[in-house]
Image: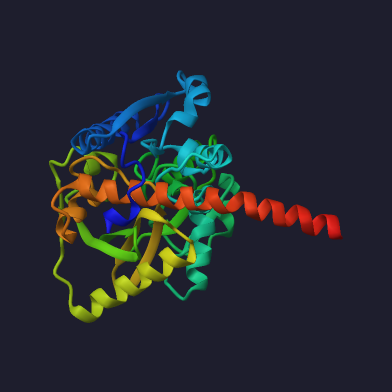
Amino acid sequence: MIVEFLYCKNRVMHIALLTDTTSREYEISEKSLVLIQDSLEKLGYAYTIIRRPEMRDQFLQTYTTYDCAIPVIHWWWWEGGQISAMLELLWVPYLFSDHDVHSLCYNKYATSLIVQDMWIAIPQTHHCVAWDDMQHISFWWPYFVKPNTNWSSLDCGICTTADQAQGLVEHICTYDTALVQEVITWRELTISMKWTDSPSIVGIMEVVTEKEFFDFDAKYKRDKTKEIFPELAPNLQQIIEDAAMSIYKKFRITDIARIDCILADKLYFLEINTIPWMTPMSFFPQCIKQYGYEWFEQFLEECIQQKVYIYKKIKKTTPTLIKHMNKQSTIV
């Protein structure tokens, strides 16, 4: 319960909202920022928006004044783990997983190999650092091509000819490596998950789109896309939830995450999103209401209070641990 985690009873919580003005998805980050700002205002929390790179130095000078940081950055600075690692060094509590979890999950190919080792199916996948790597591919057209460590809704597509695939792979390889996957006739599902008092499934949603696949326009223009809560047979829902829970625990994900899958002849894992979008129409805020929270800010407060409580507890024990370690090193 929230009451167990209350930390700043006699003063207003001060939250740092971290965002970035250089991301290709900056406009969507701003929409997520509006929802979180509105929620913090309803909670009576103070907040400061820190926009990278312009306000980086300001944050480094004032970080001790913040009770918690919330990233609203959907780019490699956060999803790759760099900023979360910095916050850990500064002892600033923040929402979402540890930096090493972000770094691993950001690499779709590495993540897929681990998931496959858990006996969960993945589409046949080929990792390319250059177009020449395609000569070693072991499955047939059509191919789905996307960046390995960047956005799965930009610079991606279904390729039915070598010329299409070569152009897209070579473009991606100018800034990343490319994933080439078999195209599966699918129902695309996304499983939203949280970990406050314990890990739990917040909701399963299905993407229904008239477009060829769920690309950037399908996500954010919405004229040809619907997101629904599908009716699933109880045994099928259990299979999906068990797979998602196993992945969530295996990768040591904390707070909030989303796992994307394809449901065809069986369940195929696609990727983990360790920082889901938080616009009012994004999957996670929709699932929160379905899960039983009356308002998004109720869930947000629970996450903040728990993270602050955990950091406070760790800070109390750390000096004792350091003292003990120094004593042991002296004995040796």
Tell me: 104 left or right of 73: right
Snapshot colouring:
rainbow
Depth order, front residue of 265/15 = 15
Q: Residue 193: percent from the left, percent from the top?
A: 32, 59
Picture layout, residue 140 above or below residue 305: below
Residue 21, quarter of the rendered image:
top left
Tell me: 310 left or right of 264: right
Name the residue located 18 percent from the left edge and 44 percent from the top edge.
281
Q: Residue 194: percent from the left, percent from the top?
A: 32, 58
Depth order, front residue of 295/311 = 311
Picture layout, residue 265 above or below residue 312: below
Depth order, front residue of 147/6 = 6
Name the residue located 53 percent from the left edge and 40 percent from the top edge.
91
Q: What is the residue that sits farthest to the bottom in this orientation?
A: 235
Q: Quadrant of the N terminus?
A: bottom left
Q: Residue 168: percent from the left, percent from the top?
A: 45, 41
Residue 218 in view: yes
Picture layout, residue 226 above or below residue 243: above
Q: Residue 17: percent from the left, percent from the top?
A: 36, 32
Depth order, front residue of 200/11 = 11
Q: Quadrant of the C terminus?
A: bottom right
Residue 123 in view: no
